[in-house]
Protein backbone atom coordinates (compact mmCIF):
# COMPACT_ATOMS: atom_id res chain seq x y z
CA UNK A 1 0.00 0.00 0.00
CA UNK A 2 1.40 3.43 -0.96
CA UNK A 3 1.84 6.12 1.68
CA UNK A 4 -0.70 8.32 -0.18
CA UNK A 5 -3.38 5.58 -0.18
CA UNK A 6 -2.73 4.82 3.46
CA UNK A 7 -3.13 8.50 4.31
CA UNK A 8 -6.46 8.71 2.42
CA UNK A 9 -7.85 5.61 4.16
CA UNK A 10 -6.79 6.94 7.55
CA UNK A 11 -8.52 10.25 6.85
CA UNK A 12 -11.74 8.50 5.83
CA UNK A 13 -11.69 6.28 8.94
CA UNK A 14 -11.04 9.25 11.22
CA UNK A 15 -13.84 11.26 9.66
CA UNK A 16 -16.24 8.34 10.04
CA UNK A 17 -15.24 7.86 13.67
CA UNK A 18 -15.81 11.55 14.33
CA UNK A 19 -19.26 11.40 12.75
CA UNK A 20 -20.18 8.35 14.86
CA UNK A 21 -19.01 10.05 18.05
CA UNK A 22 -21.07 13.12 17.28
CA UNK A 23 -24.11 10.99 16.41
CA UNK A 24 -23.83 9.12 19.73
CA UNK A 25 -23.43 12.39 21.64
CA UNK A 26 -26.44 13.91 19.81
CA UNK A 27 -28.55 10.84 20.55
CA UNK A 28 -27.58 11.00 24.22
CA UNK A 29 -28.63 14.65 24.36
CA UNK A 30 -31.97 13.91 22.68
CA UNK A 31 -32.80 10.83 24.77
CA UNK A 32 -34.91 11.85 27.78
CA UNK A 33 -33.42 11.14 31.20
CA UNK A 34 -35.02 8.30 33.11
CA UNK A 35 -37.86 9.65 35.25
CA UNK A 36 -37.34 9.39 38.98
CA UNK A 37 -39.69 7.00 40.78
CA UNK A 38 -41.10 7.67 44.25
CA UNK A 39 -39.09 6.45 47.22
CA UNK A 40 -40.17 6.89 50.83
CA UNK A 41 -36.97 8.68 51.84
CA UNK A 42 -37.08 9.86 55.45
CA UNK A 43 -39.62 7.77 57.40
CA UNK A 44 -42.98 9.55 57.47
CA UNK A 45 -44.41 11.46 60.43
CA UNK A 46 -47.82 12.83 59.44
CA UNK A 47 -51.19 13.77 60.95
CA UNK A 48 -54.85 13.77 60.02
CA UNK A 49 -57.10 16.84 60.00
CA UNK A 50 -54.95 19.89 60.56
CA UNK A 51 -55.36 23.64 60.23
CA UNK A 52 -54.53 25.65 57.08
CA UNK A 53 -50.79 25.67 56.40
CA UNK A 54 -49.56 29.03 57.63
CA UNK A 55 -45.96 29.81 58.55
CA UNK A 56 -46.82 29.58 62.25
CA UNK A 57 -48.48 26.17 61.83
CA UNK A 58 -45.65 24.87 59.64
CA UNK A 59 -43.05 25.99 62.17
CA UNK A 60 -44.95 24.29 65.00
CA UNK A 61 -45.10 21.06 63.00
CA UNK A 62 -41.42 21.19 62.06
CA UNK A 63 -40.44 21.88 65.68
CA UNK A 64 -42.53 18.89 66.79
CA UNK A 65 -40.89 16.45 64.40
CA UNK A 66 -43.60 16.20 61.75
CA UNK A 67 -42.15 15.95 58.23
CA UNK A 68 -45.16 15.46 55.94
CA UNK A 69 -47.94 18.06 55.97
CA UNK A 70 -51.24 18.53 54.17
CA UNK A 71 -51.19 21.39 51.65
CA UNK A 72 -53.18 22.98 48.91
CA UNK A 73 -51.24 24.10 45.85
CA UNK A 74 -51.02 27.63 47.23
CA UNK A 75 -49.49 26.34 50.47
CA UNK A 76 -46.59 24.41 48.92
CA UNK A 77 -44.24 27.36 49.31
CA UNK A 78 -45.01 27.51 53.03
CA UNK A 79 -44.03 23.87 53.45
CA UNK A 80 -40.82 24.44 51.52
CA UNK A 81 -39.83 27.41 53.69
CA UNK A 82 -39.93 25.17 56.75
CA UNK A 83 -38.23 22.12 55.26
CA UNK A 84 -41.43 20.07 55.16
CA UNK A 85 -42.71 17.63 52.56
CA UNK A 86 -46.21 18.21 51.24
CA UNK A 87 -49.21 15.95 50.64
CA UNK A 88 -51.29 17.77 48.04
CA UNK A 89 -55.04 18.14 48.54
CA UNK A 90 -57.01 19.28 45.50
CA UNK A 91 -60.53 18.46 44.30
CA UNK A 92 -59.22 17.40 40.88
CA UNK A 93 -57.45 14.42 42.50
CA UNK A 94 -60.56 12.33 41.96
CA UNK A 95 -61.20 9.38 39.60
CA UNK A 96 -64.07 11.33 38.00
CA UNK A 97 -61.52 13.81 36.58
CA UNK A 98 -60.35 11.14 34.14
CA UNK A 99 -63.84 10.79 32.64
CA UNK A 100 -64.28 14.48 31.85
CA UNK A 101 -61.98 15.89 29.11
CA UNK A 102 -62.08 19.37 30.61
CA UNK A 103 -61.30 18.17 34.13
CA UNK A 104 -58.58 15.84 32.81
CA UNK A 105 -56.93 18.80 31.11
CA UNK A 106 -57.14 20.72 34.38
CA UNK A 107 -55.66 17.77 36.25
CA UNK A 108 -52.81 17.55 33.74
CA UNK A 109 -52.13 21.26 34.20
CA UNK A 110 -52.14 20.83 37.99
CA UNK A 111 -49.67 17.95 37.81
CA UNK A 112 -47.40 19.92 35.51
CA UNK A 113 -47.44 22.89 37.90
CA UNK A 114 -46.69 20.99 41.12
CA UNK A 115 -44.51 18.02 40.13
CA UNK A 116 -41.35 20.11 40.07
CA UNK A 117 -42.01 21.86 43.37
CA UNK A 118 -39.29 21.10 45.97
CA UNK A 119 -41.83 20.41 48.74
CA UNK A 120 -44.02 18.06 46.69
CA UNK A 121 -44.15 14.49 48.08
CA UNK A 122 -47.55 12.91 47.45
CA UNK A 123 -51.09 13.32 46.13
CA UNK A 124 -53.95 12.68 48.55
CA UNK A 125 -56.73 10.72 46.82
CA UNK A 126 -59.17 9.03 49.18
CA UNK A 127 -59.88 7.98 52.78
CA UNK A 128 -61.33 4.56 53.59
CA UNK A 129 -62.65 3.42 50.21
CA UNK A 130 -64.97 0.47 49.70
CA UNK A 131 -63.72 -2.17 47.25
CA UNK A 132 -66.29 -0.92 44.72
CA UNK A 133 -64.08 2.15 44.33
CA UNK A 134 -60.85 0.23 43.74
CA UNK A 135 -61.04 -0.02 39.91
CA UNK A 136 -61.49 3.74 39.49
CA UNK A 137 -58.84 4.50 42.09
CA UNK A 138 -56.49 2.06 40.39
CA UNK A 139 -56.87 3.94 37.11
CA UNK A 140 -56.15 7.25 38.81
CA UNK A 141 -53.11 5.86 40.65
CA UNK A 142 -51.71 4.52 37.38
CA UNK A 143 -52.46 7.79 35.59
CA UNK A 144 -50.60 9.80 38.22
CA UNK A 145 -47.75 7.28 38.17
CA UNK A 146 -47.37 7.73 34.42
CA UNK A 147 -47.61 11.52 34.57
CA UNK A 148 -45.52 11.97 37.71
CA UNK A 149 -43.75 8.82 38.93
CA UNK A 150 -41.69 10.78 41.48
CA UNK A 151 -44.67 11.43 43.76
CA UNK A 152 -46.87 8.91 45.54
CA UNK A 153 -50.64 8.63 45.18
CA UNK A 154 -51.90 8.29 48.77
CA UNK A 155 -54.99 6.35 49.86
CA UNK A 156 -55.92 5.36 53.41
CA UNK A 157 -57.69 2.06 54.18
CA UNK A 158 -60.32 0.97 56.71
CA UNK A 159 -59.27 -0.88 59.91
CA UNK A 160 -60.17 -4.49 60.73
CA UNK A 161 -63.19 -3.44 62.78
CA UNK A 162 -64.93 -1.95 59.73
CA UNK A 163 -68.01 -4.01 58.91
CA UNK A 164 -68.62 -6.03 55.74
CA UNK A 165 -70.76 -3.29 54.21
CA UNK A 166 -68.01 -0.71 54.70
CA UNK A 167 -65.32 -2.99 53.27
CA UNK A 168 -67.44 -4.46 50.50
CA UNK A 169 -66.37 -8.00 51.38
CA UNK A 170 -67.94 -10.95 53.19
CA UNK A 171 -66.96 -13.30 56.01
CA UNK A 172 -65.55 -13.05 59.51
CA UNK A 173 -63.10 -10.31 60.52
CA UNK A 174 -59.95 -11.96 59.16
CA UNK A 175 -61.53 -13.37 56.00
CA UNK A 176 -63.26 -10.11 55.05
CA UNK A 177 -60.23 -7.93 55.78
CA UNK A 178 -57.76 -10.17 53.96
CA UNK A 179 -59.96 -10.05 50.88
CA UNK A 180 -60.25 -6.27 51.20
CA UNK A 181 -56.44 -5.91 51.26
CA UNK A 182 -55.93 -8.52 48.52
CA UNK A 183 -58.19 -6.70 46.10
CA UNK A 184 -56.66 -3.35 47.02
CA UNK A 185 -53.14 -4.54 46.32
CA UNK A 186 -54.12 -6.36 43.13
CA UNK A 187 -56.28 -3.61 41.62
CA UNK A 188 -54.85 -0.34 42.95
CA UNK A 189 -51.17 -1.37 43.22
CA UNK A 190 -50.21 1.31 45.77
CA UNK A 191 -46.64 2.44 46.45
CA UNK A 192 -47.41 2.53 50.21
CA UNK A 193 -50.12 0.97 52.39
CA UNK A 194 -51.82 3.31 54.85
CA UNK A 195 -54.56 2.35 57.28
CA UNK A 196 -56.05 3.65 60.53
CA UNK A 197 -56.80 1.81 63.74
CA UNK A 198 -58.00 3.46 66.95
CA UNK A 199 -57.22 1.35 69.97
CA UNK A 200 -58.22 3.21 73.13
CA UNK A 201 -61.87 3.25 74.22
CA UNK A 202 -63.37 4.88 77.32
CA UNK A 203 -65.49 3.81 80.23
CA UNK A 204 -69.18 4.57 80.00
CA UNK A 205 -69.67 8.29 80.62
CA UNK A 206 -72.39 10.79 79.81
CA UNK A 207 -71.84 13.61 77.36
CA UNK A 208 -71.85 16.11 80.21
CA UNK A 209 -69.14 14.19 82.08
CA UNK A 210 -67.19 13.92 78.82
CA UNK A 211 -66.97 17.66 78.19
CA UNK A 212 -63.73 19.21 79.46
CA UNK A 213 -62.26 15.91 80.65
CA UNK A 214 -58.58 15.72 79.62
CA UNK A 215 -58.58 11.94 79.16
CA UNK A 216 -60.09 8.76 80.58
CA UNK A 217 -57.35 6.80 82.31
CA UNK A 218 -59.61 3.86 83.18
CA UNK A 219 -60.83 3.02 79.71
CA UNK A 220 -60.57 -0.19 77.74
CA UNK A 221 -58.36 -1.29 74.84
CA UNK A 222 -59.45 -2.77 71.52
CA UNK A 223 -58.75 -6.42 70.76
CA UNK A 224 -57.68 -6.19 67.08
CA UNK A 225 -54.82 -3.69 67.11
CA UNK A 226 -52.07 -6.27 66.68
CA UNK A 227 -54.16 -8.33 64.26
CA UNK A 228 -54.46 -5.25 62.04
CA UNK A 229 -50.72 -4.61 62.28
CA UNK A 230 -49.97 -8.23 61.39
CA UNK A 231 -52.27 -8.29 58.34
CA UNK A 232 -50.96 -4.98 57.00
CA UNK A 233 -47.35 -6.00 57.62
CA UNK A 234 -47.91 -9.23 55.68
CA UNK A 235 -49.46 -7.42 52.71
CA UNK A 236 -46.67 -4.83 52.67
CA UNK A 237 -44.00 -7.53 52.70
CA UNK A 238 -45.64 -9.51 49.92
CA UNK A 239 -45.80 -6.39 47.72
CA UNK A 240 -42.42 -5.06 48.89
CA UNK A 241 -43.85 -1.65 49.82
CA UNK A 242 -43.70 0.33 53.08
CA UNK A 243 -46.68 0.83 55.36
CA UNK A 244 -48.01 3.66 57.53
CA UNK A 245 -50.16 3.38 60.65
CA UNK A 246 -52.64 6.14 61.57
CA UNK A 247 -53.09 6.00 65.34
CA UNK A 248 -55.36 7.66 67.86
CA UNK A 249 -54.38 10.99 69.42
CA UNK A 250 -57.76 12.37 70.49
CA UNK A 251 -61.35 11.61 71.46
CA UNK A 252 -64.29 12.45 69.20
CA UNK A 253 -67.00 10.59 71.08
CA UNK A 254 -67.60 9.59 74.71
CA UNK A 255 -66.75 5.99 73.83
CA UNK A 256 -63.12 6.84 72.96
CA UNK A 257 -60.51 8.26 75.32
CA UNK A 258 -57.63 10.67 74.73
CA UNK A 259 -54.35 8.71 74.98
CA UNK A 260 -51.74 9.89 77.45
CA UNK A 261 -47.97 10.11 76.84
CA UNK A 262 -47.27 6.47 77.73
CA UNK A 263 -50.08 5.23 75.49
CA UNK A 264 -48.75 7.32 72.60
CA UNK A 265 -45.32 5.76 73.17
CA UNK A 266 -46.96 2.32 72.99
CA UNK A 267 -48.48 3.19 69.58
CA UNK A 268 -45.20 4.56 68.20
CA UNK A 269 -43.01 1.67 69.30
CA UNK A 270 -45.40 -1.15 68.37
CA UNK A 271 -45.67 0.35 64.88
CA UNK A 272 -41.88 0.30 64.65
CA UNK A 273 -41.62 -3.28 65.92
CA UNK A 274 -43.93 -4.47 63.12
CA UNK A 275 -41.75 -2.72 60.54
CA UNK A 276 -43.76 0.47 59.96
CA UNK A 277 -42.00 3.21 58.02
CA UNK A 278 -44.68 5.82 58.65
CA UNK A 279 -46.89 7.00 61.46
CA UNK A 280 -49.75 9.49 61.46
CA UNK A 281 -51.90 10.88 64.27
CA UNK A 282 -55.65 11.44 64.35
CA UNK A 283 -56.06 14.39 64.79
CA UNK A 284 -53.86 17.47 64.73
CA UNK A 285 -56.73 19.84 65.46
CA UNK A 286 -60.37 19.54 64.42
CA UNK A 287 -63.74 20.82 65.70
CA UNK A 288 -65.58 18.61 68.23
CA UNK A 289 -62.41 16.60 68.92
CA UNK A 290 -60.83 16.61 72.38
CA UNK A 291 -57.11 16.18 72.80
CA UNK A 292 -55.23 16.15 69.53
CA UNK A 293 -51.92 17.85 68.92
CA UNK A 294 -52.99 21.51 69.02
CA UNK A 295 -55.85 23.38 70.66
CA UNK A 296 -58.30 25.44 68.56
CA UNK A 297 -56.25 28.56 69.31
CA UNK A 298 -53.11 26.84 67.97
CA UNK A 299 -51.37 26.28 71.30
CA UNK A 300 -49.74 22.83 71.66
CA UNK A 301 -51.35 20.15 73.82
CA UNK A 302 -49.83 17.63 76.22
CA UNK A 303 -49.81 15.15 73.32
CA UNK A 304 -47.79 17.58 71.17
CA UNK A 305 -45.15 17.80 73.89
CA UNK A 306 -44.99 14.00 74.16
CA UNK A 307 -44.74 13.52 70.39
CA UNK A 308 -42.05 16.19 70.13
CA UNK A 309 -39.81 13.57 71.74
CA UNK A 310 -41.36 10.47 70.18
CA UNK A 311 -41.41 11.70 66.55
CA UNK A 312 -37.60 12.05 66.25
CA UNK A 313 -37.25 8.66 67.93
CA UNK A 314 -39.57 7.11 65.36
CA UNK A 315 -37.61 8.61 62.46
CA UNK A 316 -34.24 7.62 63.93
CA UNK A 317 -35.20 3.99 64.55
CA UNK A 318 -37.17 3.53 61.32
CA UNK A 319 -34.19 4.94 59.40
CA UNK A 320 -31.92 2.32 60.95
CA UNK A 321 -34.35 -0.41 59.86
CA UNK A 322 -35.22 0.95 56.42
CA UNK A 323 -32.64 -1.06 54.47
CA UNK A 324 -33.47 -4.26 56.39
CA UNK A 325 -36.34 -6.72 56.08
CA UNK A 326 -38.78 -7.37 58.90
CA UNK A 327 -38.16 -11.06 59.55
CA UNK A 328 -40.41 -11.87 62.48
CA UNK A 329 -42.70 -10.40 65.11
CA UNK A 330 -43.09 -12.35 68.35
CA UNK A 331 -45.19 -11.81 71.48
CA UNK A 332 -44.15 -12.78 74.99
CA UNK A 333 -46.64 -12.76 77.86
CA UNK A 334 -50.17 -12.07 76.62
CA UNK A 335 -50.93 -13.37 73.13
CA UNK A 336 -53.21 -11.05 71.11
CA UNK A 337 -55.17 -11.90 67.98
CA UNK A 338 -52.70 -12.22 65.12
CA UNK A 339 -49.76 -12.68 67.49
CA UNK A 340 -47.07 -15.36 67.27
CA UNK A 341 -45.04 -16.82 70.15
CA UNK A 342 -41.25 -16.60 70.25
CA UNK A 343 -39.85 -19.79 68.64
CA UNK A 344 -37.46 -21.97 70.60
CA UNK A 345 -34.66 -21.34 68.09
CA UNK A 346 -35.04 -17.55 68.03
CA UNK A 347 -31.77 -15.67 67.42
CA UNK A 348 -32.82 -13.12 70.05
CA UNK A 349 -34.35 -13.89 73.43
CA UNK A 350 -34.82 -12.18 76.77
CA UNK A 351 -33.66 -13.23 80.23
CA UNK A 352 -35.52 -13.98 82.41
CA UNK A 353 -38.06 -15.62 80.10
CA UNK A 354 -41.56 -14.13 80.04
CA UNK A 355 -44.22 -16.61 81.14
CA UNK A 356 -47.37 -16.96 79.00
CA UNK A 357 -50.35 -14.99 80.32
CA UNK A 358 -54.04 -15.34 79.57
CA UNK A 359 -55.53 -12.50 77.53
CA UNK A 360 -59.15 -11.52 77.09
CA UNK A 361 -59.84 -8.25 75.25
CA UNK A 362 -60.54 -5.50 76.22
CA UNK A 363 -58.01 -6.30 78.93
CA UNK A 364 -54.86 -4.17 78.75
CA UNK A 365 -51.78 -5.89 77.34
CA UNK A 366 -48.86 -7.08 79.45
CA UNK A 367 -45.66 -8.61 78.18
CA UNK A 368 -43.30 -7.76 75.35
CA UNK A 369 -43.04 -7.90 71.60
CA UNK A 370 -39.80 -8.62 69.72
CA UNK A 371 -39.51 -7.48 66.13
CA UNK A 372 -36.51 -8.99 64.33
CA UNK A 373 -34.87 -7.47 61.25
CA UNK A 374 -32.03 -8.32 58.90
CA UNK A 375 -31.65 -10.27 55.69
CA UNK A 376 -33.55 -13.54 55.04
CA UNK A 377 -32.17 -16.22 57.32
CA UNK A 378 -29.90 -13.77 59.17
CA UNK A 379 -31.55 -11.62 61.85
CA UNK A 380 -29.14 -8.88 62.93
CA UNK A 381 -31.43 -6.37 64.68
CA UNK A 382 -34.21 -6.65 67.25
CA UNK A 383 -36.65 -4.06 68.57
CA UNK A 384 -37.91 -4.99 72.04
CA UNK A 385 -41.10 -3.24 73.20
CA UNK A 386 -42.75 -3.15 76.62
CA UNK A 387 -46.46 -3.72 75.96
CA UNK A 388 -47.41 -2.58 79.45
CA UNK A 389 -47.92 1.18 79.06
CA UNK A 390 -48.59 1.59 82.80
CA UNK A 391 -45.12 0.76 84.19
CA UNK A 392 -41.43 0.42 83.36
CA UNK A 393 -39.81 -2.93 82.70
CA UNK A 394 -36.22 -4.18 82.98
CA UNK A 395 -34.92 -7.17 81.03
CA UNK A 396 -31.77 -8.52 79.43
CA UNK A 397 -31.64 -9.19 75.70
CA UNK A 398 -29.57 -12.18 74.60
CA UNK A 399 -28.34 -12.26 71.01
CA UNK A 400 -26.31 -14.45 68.62
CA UNK A 401 -23.25 -12.20 68.94
CA UNK A 402 -21.88 -9.16 70.81
CA UNK A 403 -24.70 -6.63 71.08
CA UNK A 404 -25.02 -2.88 70.63
CA UNK A 405 -27.90 -0.66 71.80
CA UNK A 406 -29.14 2.24 69.69
CA UNK A 407 -29.71 5.68 71.20
CA UNK A 408 -32.31 7.44 69.02
CA UNK A 409 -31.53 10.81 70.62
CA UNK A 410 -27.90 10.80 69.45
CA UNK A 411 -28.16 8.36 66.53
CA UNK A 412 -25.25 6.35 67.97
CA UNK A 413 -24.79 2.68 68.78
CA UNK A 414 -23.30 1.82 72.18
CA UNK A 415 -21.71 -1.61 72.74
CA UNK A 416 -23.01 -3.74 75.59
CA UNK A 417 -20.47 -4.34 78.33
CA UNK A 418 -21.74 -7.92 78.61
CA UNK A 419 -21.09 -9.06 75.05
CA UNK A 420 -24.01 -11.18 73.86
CA UNK A 421 -26.16 -9.95 76.75
CA UNK A 422 -27.52 -6.42 77.02
CA UNK A 423 -29.48 -5.23 80.07
CA UNK A 424 -32.11 -2.63 79.09
CA UNK A 425 -34.74 -0.52 80.80
CA UNK A 426 -37.99 -0.04 78.90
CA UNK A 427 -40.27 2.92 79.61
CA UNK A 428 -44.03 2.27 79.79
CA UNK A 429 -44.97 1.34 76.22
CA UNK A 430 -41.38 2.04 75.14
CA UNK A 431 -38.76 0.06 73.29
CA UNK A 432 -35.07 -0.39 72.55
CA UNK A 433 -33.37 -1.24 69.28
CA UNK A 434 -30.38 -3.59 69.46
CA UNK A 435 -28.12 -5.19 66.88
CA UNK A 436 -25.31 -7.68 66.60
CA UNK A 437 -22.10 -5.69 66.40
CA UNK A 438 -21.09 -5.47 62.71
Image (cartoon, helix red, strand yellow):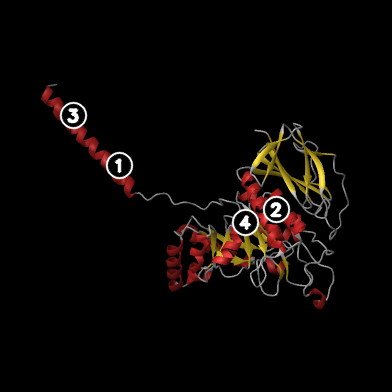
Q: Which of marks 2 and 1 is in front?
A: 2
The answer to whether the residue labelled 3 contacts the one labelled 4, judged by CB atoms less than 8 Å apart, is no
Q: Please name the residue that numbered disc 2 is placed on.
A: 271
- 216 to the left or right of 68: right
Q: Quarter of the image containing the C terminus?
A: top right
- 424 to the left or right of 94: right
Q: Looking at the image, which is closer to me, 275 or 338? A: 275
Q: Please name the residue that numbered disc 1 is placed on.
A: 24
Q: What separation in Å lies between label 2 and label 4 (alpha carbons)? A: 17 Å
Across and down, in percent, residue 60 comes to: 60, 62
Give the mark nearer the N terminus: 2 vs 3.
Answer: 3
Q: Please name the residue that numbered disc 3 is placed on.
A: 10
Q: Nearer the viewer, mark 2 or mark 3?
A: 2
Q: Nearer the viewer, mark 3 or mark 4?
A: 4
Q: What separation in Å lies between label 3 and label 4 (alpha carbons)? A: 67 Å
Give the mark nearer the N terminus: 3 vs 4.
Answer: 3
Give the mark nearer the N terminus: 4 vs 1.
Answer: 1
Q: What separation in Å lies between label 4 and label 1 (alpha carbons)? A: 48 Å
The answer to whether the residue labelled 4 contacts the one labelled 1, judged by CB atoms less than 8 Å apart, is no
Give the mark nearer the N terminus: 2 vs 1.
Answer: 1
The answer to whether the residue labelled 2 contacts the one labelled 1, judged by CB atoms less than 8 Å apart, is no
Secondary structure of the residue carrying tag 3 is helix
Tell me which residue sits at (11%, 25%) in the image.
4
Residue count near mark 1 (Cα–Cα under 10 Å), binned few <14, some 14–19, many ≥20: few
Q: Looking at the image, which is closer to me, 437 or 78? A: 78
Secondary structure of the residue carrying tag 4 is loop
Q: Quarter of the image containing the N terminus?
A: top left
The count of marks equals: 4
Amino acid sequence: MSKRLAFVLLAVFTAGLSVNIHLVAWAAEKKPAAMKTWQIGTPIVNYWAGPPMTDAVAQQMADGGWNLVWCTEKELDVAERHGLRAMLQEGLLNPSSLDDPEKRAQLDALIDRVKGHPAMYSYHLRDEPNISGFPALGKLVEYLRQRDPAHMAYINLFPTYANNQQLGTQGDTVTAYKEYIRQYMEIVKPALISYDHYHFSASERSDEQFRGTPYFANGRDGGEYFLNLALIRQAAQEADVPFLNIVQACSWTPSMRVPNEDEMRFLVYTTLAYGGQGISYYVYCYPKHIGGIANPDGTPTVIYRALKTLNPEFVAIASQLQSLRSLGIFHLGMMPMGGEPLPANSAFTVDPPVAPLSYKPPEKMKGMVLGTFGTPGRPTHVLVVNLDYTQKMSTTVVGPGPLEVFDPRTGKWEPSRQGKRAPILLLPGGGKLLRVRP
